[in-house]
Image: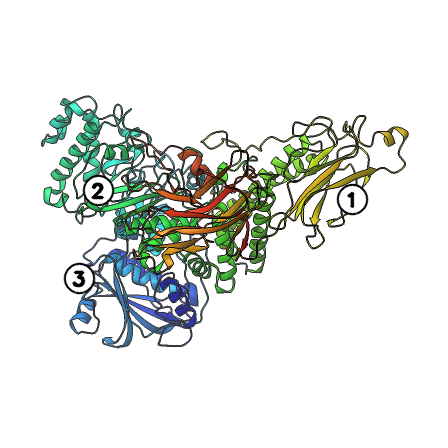
């Protein structure tokens, strides 16, 4: 894998980690000294180069100072002549009048970096003519660069690192690669990543040719920005005349961040701001920085949503009947003669396009309804076609027809978001020079990608993706829940299907999504470096860059686990009912995993120098600790409710614990908001506890708690008992077991599944008591056989019943367990009512099945408790890896792309549809003990990721076969017309999984075969559950069954 090779090369060479970059910098004395704590690097650049390049030269000079303690110098070649390009906005923002940075009086001259853009730099052009640098690989390309060591590049310079960009951003990326390599993170400002410290920085004698990015326009969308980002803006920047101060002083840092991340494209904040109006400096500043501006899917022709709300007249509604008149060259003064609605909207479009003409941008075409809604009640293609026609005429009038039809001159895109995809489904088309921006479903599942007959469109295609969303089934806009493995899988699919013109991702408030943003842009910049196993290696590079190599591997492992755990279900959708308290010990297992993550985060945080702790807190410690706290709240509330129903005194203790964690959640937010003297004030103001429907709660609200009457004794006495897999408790009555019964029965124990289950003994009265537990079989033991409990409710006793199979008799049977209570110095009444006035001593029944496998059963799964659970990467055989496979289509495992372990999918993702007769098949050997059931049915559920049908003519399908029964082909996603999401989508995205169940005749105990075929690339298999009558409800399903290898 190329990423692993780069990581190994960088570490071996003693280089700083620059993610995805071939090393040109080292700290071990190899090559040419560039800068040190006593010698300042000299950066030389042509005065007539792009302002974006000149500004970044200053950044790099200061980055050397951040690392060595001594800023570099910037020398403008041809200084004294008037520059040909305007830098007025950069000067305005910085308060400077030149890019030239003089040498510090205490520093010596260091090494030289010469930077320039082909065609805009006399020195670079001269070096090309002299044959000292070879730019043939990048000339005429998009955003590429060459970095090479050159001898005698100019008089007085013996050696120089020369960086030549194919265009202005190519040069910028080459320069920022140096910054990242010397130890300055792109997140040095927005996430407070500390610069590394080095006393000596050397240029390696190597040549790097950085090709054009994989995706042409790579950007993010600042969206859903209240309350957090808007609160931050209100606290840090003066307001505009129309609202919060989303001004150039804010955006300058956003522009720099994008460029340092090797991105180039921005959809600015939407809901309560107007990028071009709030601060007239913002758009020209973006252009001087080299940022390509756009507007969102619901903001056509470079106009912000709020601009219509503030300056528009009448409803935001297009009138089809008058649009044709407006296509002619009608003076703007006469527009009012042509309809009461379009007379405002048409000039509104014109003004947006005219305003954007001097700058680099991508125009949004089409039109949606006001406030991110549908344009009409149905799919009105004639209406939207007239809008696009009018917009096209406007652009023709401004740029000329030939320029409009050239996407390199006037880039345009039509975003097929939500219902707009329905227009395409209904047959609406736009000119081929307009980029089709396909979208995900707001939950990271791409809905449509180019078909074979759509890939030759000159405008190409792209993807609008989401890391943040407001809407059904629930908002998710608090902290990072992005599963990096899923991001790779979906964007790789887009890349291989030629959707590479634009990738733009909705990042909400920007913070706290630093981690997935970095990953997304690294994929977009050079997708070829990354494969399905790359996430752990990428995370290690990311952690080394942000926090240092000493803790990189541990941090990477932590965040890899976090990515899976947080991706199982959005926080906002996790409530006290999500995870089962009684089945498979699910809630406890999940909470224990979060607790381990939090402990790891705490340990790493405590080991860090003070300068590194803020960055680690923002990007690792806070999401992990806040995630653990959130899960602890929800699971504690669930336990409280269950324990109160069982009459446990500990219900009240759990209620207090939930309230304490609720307060801890608040404290974490306050810590974030006040970190570094309030630098990120209000950035953690987002409510996240107390959802009642899809929209955010207006105020945090703890889920309902229950309390028991601690001064009153339970009618069934002071001691209660319950066991795993049931809500029932004894003695006493409840809805979960027969009235007046004092017996509970475990699920069966067997050597291939459950060998231990827990028993909870608890206080539900007002007096302390002692308890004892015993069994009538010597092969059953207990983790504890006696104890005492007080009524204060601070502890319950969890006792594990354990079967020793070396002592257990063969076959099946039942063991009786007695749990007795006694009280010190009881009164006569106490003695007679140890178990209440009408109940008796609890008894527990432990069924066991000592089953044995035949010696010839190998490489397969063994049933227990009436079910099998199979992680599908654990196949018994796979024909795609054998000589039988002549198609070249193979199964690949995607580690972590699952709620539990991994995903299995077909490669290449551009393969044809597969068939049962010719496609590769996965086979799983099974052994069962369950007798023939009353219905003789095995219900087999396949769990897949939430991927969607990106090709409407090839819906995702799989085939499944049990034993020699006829295979069944299953289509589990059914698209709907009008751009609607598929049937069952709300449940699937909430659960982060599609599940589909198929019934087969079950022939009885013995050896069986399960076969699974993925029939379409793009579907990702996770898990199979074979239910022979024993599966119980849970979120994640049973843990994986015993496997014989």
Q: Using residue 717 as the reference point, say whether residue 956 is left or right of it.
A: left
Q: Which residue is mark 1?
A: 774
- The image quadrant of residue 983 is top left
Q: Residue at x 44, y 71 (%)?
A: 199
Residue 393 seen in this snapshot: yes
Provide residue 376's location: percent of width, then percent of height.
27, 25
Q: Which comes before the other along the chain, label 3 or label 2?
A: 3
The label number, if any, that marks residue 119 in the structure image: 3
Instruction: Quote the CA–CA distance across marks 3 and 2.
Output: 25 Å
* Rendering coords of residue 286 (x, y %): 28, 48
Say left or right for 1028 vs 841: left
Q: Position of residue 291 (x, y in %)?
A: 28, 50
Front residue of this view, candidates 338 and 58:
338
Q: In the figure, is residue 525 to the left or right of 1037? A: left
* For the residues bearing labels 1 and 3, Cβ distance under 8 angstroms: no
Q: In what element is the residue under mark 1?
A: strand
* Closer to us: 824 or 6: 824
Total labels drawn:
3
Q: Residues within 10 Å of mark 2 (few under 14, many from 20)?
A: many
- 3D distance between C-alphas at marks 1 and 3: 89 Å
Q: Quadrant of the N terminus?
A: bottom left
Q: Which numbered mark, 2 or 1, is in the foreground of this view? A: 1
Circle number at residue 356: 2
Q: Secondary structure at mark 3?
A: loop
Tell me where residue 523 sits by quadrant. bottom left
**Percent x, y of residue 791:** 78, 36
Answer whether residue 256 is visible to the viewer in this image.
Answer: no
Q: Is label 2 in a helix, a strand or a loop?
A: helix
* Residue at image location 42% in from the left, 66% down from the top: 16
């Amino acid at each position: 894998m190329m990423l692993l090779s780069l990581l190994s090369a960088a570490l071996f060479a003693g280089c700083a980690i620059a993610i995805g970059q071939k090393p040109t910098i080292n700290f071990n004395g190899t090559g040419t000294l560039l800068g040190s704590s006593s010698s300042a690097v000299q950066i030389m650049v042509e005065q007539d180069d792009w302002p974006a390049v000149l500004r970044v030269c200053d950044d790099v000079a200061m980055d050397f100072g951040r690392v060595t303690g001594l800023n570099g110098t910037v020398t403008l070649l041809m200084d004294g002549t008037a520059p040909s390009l305007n830098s007025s906005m950069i000067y305005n923002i910085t308060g400077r009048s030149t890019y030239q940075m003089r040498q510090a009086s205490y520093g010596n001259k260091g090494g030289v970096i010469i930077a320039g853009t082909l065609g805009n730099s006399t020195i670079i052009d001269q070096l090309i003519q002299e044959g000292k640098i070879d730019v043939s690989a990048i000339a005429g390309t998009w955003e590429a660069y060459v970095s090479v060591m050159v001898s005698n590049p100019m008089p007085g310079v013996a050696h120089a690192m020369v960086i030549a960009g194919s265009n202005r951003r190519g040069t910028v990326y080459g320069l920022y690669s140096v910054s990242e390599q010397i130890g300055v993170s792109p997140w040095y400002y927005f996430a407070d990543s500390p610069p590394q410290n080095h006393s000596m920085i050397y240029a390696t004698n190597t040549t790097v040719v950085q090709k054009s990015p994989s995706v042409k326009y790579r950007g993010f969308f600042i969206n859903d920005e209240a309350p957090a980002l808007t609160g931050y803006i209100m606290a840090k920047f003066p307001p505009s005349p129309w609202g919060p101060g989303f001004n150039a002083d804010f955006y300058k840092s956003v522009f720099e961040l994008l460029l340092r991340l090797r991105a180039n494209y921005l959809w600015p904040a939407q809901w309560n701001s107007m990028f071009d109006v709030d601060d007239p400096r913002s758009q020209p500043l973006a252009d001087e920085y080299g940022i390509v501006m756009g507007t969102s899917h619901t903001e056509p022709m470079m106009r912000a949503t709020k601009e219509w709300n503030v300056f528009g007249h009448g409803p935001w509604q297009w009138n089809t009947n008058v649009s044709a008149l407006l296509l002619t060259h009608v003076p703007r003064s006469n527009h009012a003669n042509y309809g009461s609605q379009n007379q405002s909207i048409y000039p509104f479009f014109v003004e947006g396009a005219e305003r954007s003409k001097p700058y680099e941008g991508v125009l949004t075409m089409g039109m949606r309804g006001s406030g991110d809604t549908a344009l009409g009640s149905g799919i009105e293609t004639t209406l939207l076609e007239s809008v696009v026609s009018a917009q096209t005429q406007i652009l023709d009038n401004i740029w000329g027809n030939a320029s409009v039809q050239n996407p390199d001159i006037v880039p345009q895109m039509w975003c097929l978001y939500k219902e707009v995809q329905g227009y395409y489904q209904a047959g609406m088309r736009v000119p081929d020079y307009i980029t089709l921006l396909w979208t995900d479903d707001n939950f990271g599942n791409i809905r449509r990608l180019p078909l074979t007959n759509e890939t030759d469109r000159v405008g190409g295609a792209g993807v609008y993706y989401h890391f943040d969303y407001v809407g059904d089934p629930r908002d998710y806009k608090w902290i990072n829940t992005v599963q990096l493995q899923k991001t790779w899988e979906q964007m790789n699919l887009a890349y291989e299907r030629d959707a590479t013109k634009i990738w733009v991702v909705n990042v909400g408030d920007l913070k706290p999504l630093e981690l997935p943003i970095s990953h997304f842009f690294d994929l977009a910049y050079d997708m070829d470096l990354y494969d399905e196993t790359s996430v752990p290696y990428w995370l290690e590079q990311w952690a080394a860059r942000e926090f240092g190599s000493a803790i990189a591997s541990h941090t990477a492992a932590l965040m890899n686990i976090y990515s899976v755990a947080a991706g199982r279900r959005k926080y906002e959708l996790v409530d006290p009912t999500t995870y089962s308290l009684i089945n498979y010990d699910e809630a406890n297992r999940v909470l224990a995993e979060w607790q381990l993550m939090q402990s790891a985060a705490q340990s790493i945080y405590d080991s860090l120098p003070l300068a590194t702790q803020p960055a680690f807190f923002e990007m690792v410690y806070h999401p992990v600790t806040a995630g653990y706290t959130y899960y602890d709240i929800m699971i504690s509330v669930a336990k409280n409710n269950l324990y109160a129903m069982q009459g446990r005194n500990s219900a009240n203790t759990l209620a207090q614990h939930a309230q304490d964690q609720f307060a801890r959640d608040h404290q974490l937010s306050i810590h974030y908001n006040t970190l570094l003297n309030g630098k990120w004030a209000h950035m953690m103001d987002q409510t996240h506890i107390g959802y009642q429907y899809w929209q955010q709660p207006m105020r945090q609200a703890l889920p309902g708690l229950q309390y028991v009457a601690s001064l009153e004794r339970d009618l069934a006495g002071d001691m209660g008992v319950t066991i795993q897999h049931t809500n029932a408790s004894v003695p006493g009555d409840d809805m979960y077991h027969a009235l007046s019964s004092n017996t509970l029965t475990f699920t069966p124990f067997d050597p291939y599944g459950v060998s231990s289950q827990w028993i909870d003994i608890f206080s539900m009265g007002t007096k302390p008591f002692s308890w004892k537990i015993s069994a009538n079989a010597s092969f059953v033991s207990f983790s504890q056989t006696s104890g005492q409990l007080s009524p204060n409710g601070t502890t319950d006793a969890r006792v594990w019943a354990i079967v020793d199979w070396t002592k257990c008799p063969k076959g099946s049977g039942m063991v009786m367990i007695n749990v007795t209570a006694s009280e010190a110095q009881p009164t006569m009444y106490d003695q007679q009512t140890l178990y209440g006035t009408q109940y008796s001593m609890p008894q527990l029944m432990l069924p066991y099945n000592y089953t044995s496998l035949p010696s010839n059963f190998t490489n397969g799964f063994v049933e227990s408790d009436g079910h099998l659970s199979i992680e599908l990467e654990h196949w018994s055989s796979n024909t795609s890896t054998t000589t039988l496979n002549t198609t070249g289509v193979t199964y690949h495992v995607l580690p972590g792309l699952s709620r539990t372990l991994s995903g299995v999918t077909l490669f290449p993702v551009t393969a044809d549809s597969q068939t049962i007769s010719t496609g590769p098949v996965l086979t799983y050997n099974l052994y069962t003990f369950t007798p023939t059931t009353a219905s003789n049915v095995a219900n087999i559920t396949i769990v897949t990721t939430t991927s969607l049908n990106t090709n409407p003519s090839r819906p995702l399908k799989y085939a499944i076969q049990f034993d020699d029964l006829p295979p069944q082909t299953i289509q589990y996603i059914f698209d709907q017309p009008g751009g609607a999401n598929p049937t069952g989508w709300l449940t699937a995205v909430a659960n982060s999984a599609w599940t589909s169940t198929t019934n087969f005749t079950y022939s009885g105990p013995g050896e069986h075969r399960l076969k699974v075929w993925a029939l379409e690339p793009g579907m990702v298999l996770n898990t199979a559950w074979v239910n022979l009558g024993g599966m119980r409800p849970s979120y994640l399903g049973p843990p994986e069954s015993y496997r014989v290898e």
